[in-house]
Image (spheres, rainbow, N blue to C red):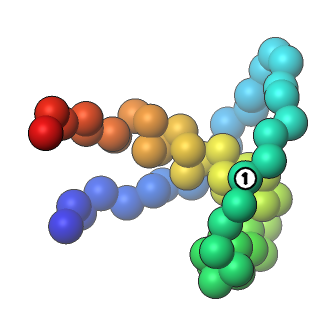
């Protein structure tokens, strides 16, 4: 398992945005909402930060 941690930093996003829909397990959404509440950020901000982190750290391997 990786020792990487998601560090929450102030970041403002500019430009257009798009509304999407996705399904999440209820327990995962509860964890996301807890992180949002604990950090004073919105659910949307947490999801964007998590997606940004994942995209910057993803490693795609061939089968």
- Residue 15 sits in quarter: top right
Q: Nearer the viewer, residue 63 or 8?
A: 63
Residue 1: image x %, image y %?
A: 19, 67
Answer above or below: position of 59 versus 21.
above
Question: At 67% across and 56% down in the image, what residue appears?
Answer: 46
- Residue 10 sits in quarter: top right
How busy is the neighbourhood of tag 1: few (under 14 within 10 Å), some, or many (20 plus)?
few
Q: Nearer the viewer, residue 58 or 13?
A: 58
Q: Which residue is mark 1?
A: 22
| Horizontal side of residue 39 vs 28, given as left or right | right
Question: At 64% across and 74% down in the image, what residue appears?
Answer: 25
* Local SS, label 1: loop
Residue 59: image x %, image y %?
A: 25, 38
Answer above or below: position of 55 versus 2.
above
Residue positioned most to the front: 63
Residue 38 makes an appearance in the image? no
Residue 43 makes an appearance in the image? yes
Question: At 83% across and 26% down in the image, what residue appears?
Answer: 17
**Quadrant where the C terminus lies?**
top left
């Amino acid at each position: 398992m990786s020792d990487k941690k998601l560090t929450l930093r102030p970041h403002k996003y500019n430009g257009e945005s798009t509304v999407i829909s996705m399904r999440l397990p209820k327990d995962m959404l509860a964890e996301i909402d807890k992180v949002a509440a604990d950090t004073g950020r919105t659910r949307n901000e947490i999801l964007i930060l998590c997606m940004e982190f994942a995209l910057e750290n993803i490693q795609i391997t061939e089968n």
